[in-house]
Amino acid sequence: MKKFILIPLVMFSIMINAQGKFVLTEQGLRTNSGKDYIILNYPGMSQETLYKLYLSNLSAIYISPKDAISSIPNSMINITGFAMNICSQGFVNYDAYYTVVFQFKDGKVRINAPEMQGSNGEIARHGKYFIYLKGHNDPGFVNVVFSIWNKKGKLKKEKFKKSIEDYFNNYIAMIVKEANKKDKW
């Protein structure tokens, strides 16, 4: 009996790990198959139950949930967050604003790829230091500009790419792990 219970739990864990990884591309975060979302299956769970479960867990993460979370009850949760020190170079640590959207249906949760976007089109910044996904020229403000890919599509900053991927994959894994706990007490 124990073997039959253990096998579905292991398979569920493998499914989450396989689907739950985003890679940073020139177009932003995507799955290995190029999709900008992942789907997690929760057989037998209602849309309302999944929504409440995720909302509760997401609310526990943020100091001021009312400032970070907006939602359409039982349908969607939108997170607007701030990632401190998402990547670094030398003495400069870069921060990023991001949004992540969770959508719910009976038995399914869709997690859209996190999107990063600053006021100048950058994905991360520190003062006048900017990081862009793809080749970008300084708009003339005496800024220091880094691009993860050059204009021809060649990867220039592997360290930045990996750091951003790790941050968001760990963030999503933490949320999914908490949502999958049956009893948190």
Image (spheres, rainbow, N blue to C red):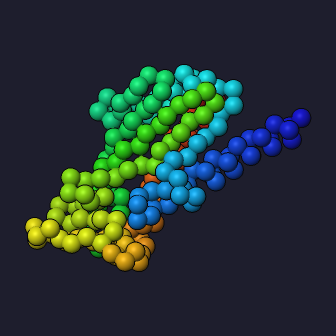
Can residue 13 be seen in the rendering of this structure? yes
Vertical placement of residue 146 versus 9, above or below: below
Q: Quadrant of the N terminus?
A: top right
Residue 120 location, x and y as percent? 20, 57
Q: Nearer the viewer, residue 161 or 112?
A: 112
> Which residue shows up at 63% across the image and 47% down it?
16
Q: Is residue 52 left or right of residue 88?
A: right
User: Where residue 132 sits: x, y (%)?
Assistant: 30, 65
**Could you say where residue 169 lies in the image, as x and y percent from the top left?**
50, 53
Residue drawn 39% across the image and 28% down it: 71
Q: For this rendering, which residue is in front, 21 or 4?
A: 21
Quadrant containing the C terminus in the rendered view: top right
Judging depth in this view, the residue of 175 and 161 nearest the camera is: 161
Q: Quadrant of residue 99?
A: top left
Horizontal relation, residue 41 to residue 94: left or right: right
Q: Is residue 96 left or right of residue 185?
A: left
Disc tally is: 0
Q: Residue at x 41, y 60 (%)?
A: 27
Residue lying farthest front?
152
Question: Which residue ends up furthest to the right in the rendered image?
Answer: 1
- Residue 55: % across, % down: 46, 29
Residue 166 seen anywhere in this rendered image of the structure = no
| 33 with respect to 90 (left or right) | right
Identified at 69% across, 26% down, the residue is 44
The image quadrant that residue 96 belongs to is: bottom left
